[in-house]
Amino acid sequence: MQKDRAMELFERGLQALSNDEPVRALSFFERALSIEPLPIVKSYLAYCIARERGQVSHAISLCEEAISVEKDNPLHYLNLGRIYLIKRDKIKAIQIFRAGLKHGIRPEIIEELERLGTRKTTVIPFLKRKNPINKYLGLVLSKLRLR
C-alpha cells in the first residue's frame, strides 16, 4: 500500500519533470521518498535538488546511494551525469553516461552524449591536445574545411 502511494507520487513527479516543472517534481519526489526510500526516487530527487537548489554535493551523494543499491539501473547514471553537468564537470559527466550505457541502452543517455558532442582527433597525434601547434593547425584546417 505504502509502496503504491510512493510510486504514484514518483510518477506524478516524472510527469512534472517532463512538463518542465522541476520545483513541482521536487515536491512529489520528496513526498515519495518520505513514504518509501526507493533508489529510483532518490536518484530523481537528487537531480532536482541539484537543479533547483544548487546542492550538488548532496545530490551526488544521494545519487551514488541509489547506484550502490541498484548498480544495473542506467537511469541512476543518467541523473548522476546530469548532476555533473550542472556542476560543469563535462568530462566526469561523459564518463558516467558511458558507464550507464554499459548497464542498458537508454535514449536519454544517448541524447545527452550527442548533445555534448565528440572532439576530433588531434592533427599531430604525438603532441598533446593543448600544444599550440596542434591547436592552431587544427583551427586553420577547420577554417579551410580540410578537416
Image (tube, grey):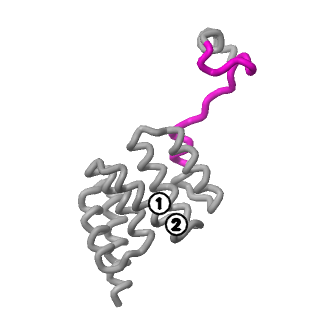
Query: Can you give x and y, in whole percent of width and height, for residue 28 in the image?
Result: 28, 69
Identify the residue position indicated by label 2 in the image.
68
- Image position of 14 (left or right of 89): left
What residue do we see at 35% from left, 62% from top? Answer: 45
Q: In the depicted view, which residue is nearer to us: 64 or 52?
A: 64
Identify the residue position indicated by label 1 in the image.
64
Query: Can you give x and y, in whole percent of width and height, for residue 131 in the image?
Result: 62, 14
Q: Residue 94 falls in which quadrant of the image? A: top right
Query: Can you give x and y, in whole percent of width and height, for residue 39 in the image?
Result: 44, 70
- Image position of 90 (left or right of 135): left
Residue type of the residue flagged with mark 1: Glu
What residue do we see at 59% from left, 18% from top? Answer: 130
Residue type of the residue flagged with mark 2: Ser
Q: Are marks 2 and 1 in contact (CB under 8 Å)?
A: yes
- Label 2 to label 1, Cα distance in Å? 6 Å
Farthest-out residue, bottom? 1
Tell me if residue 95 is in the magenta stretch. Answer: no
Is 146 situated above or below 88? above
What residue do we see at 74% from left, 21% from top? Answer: 125
Q: Specify start and end residues of the magenta stretch as a single range.
A: 111-131
Q: Residue 37 falls in which quadrant of the image? A: bottom left
Query: Can you give x and y, in whole percent of width and height, for residue 95 in the image?
Result: 58, 46
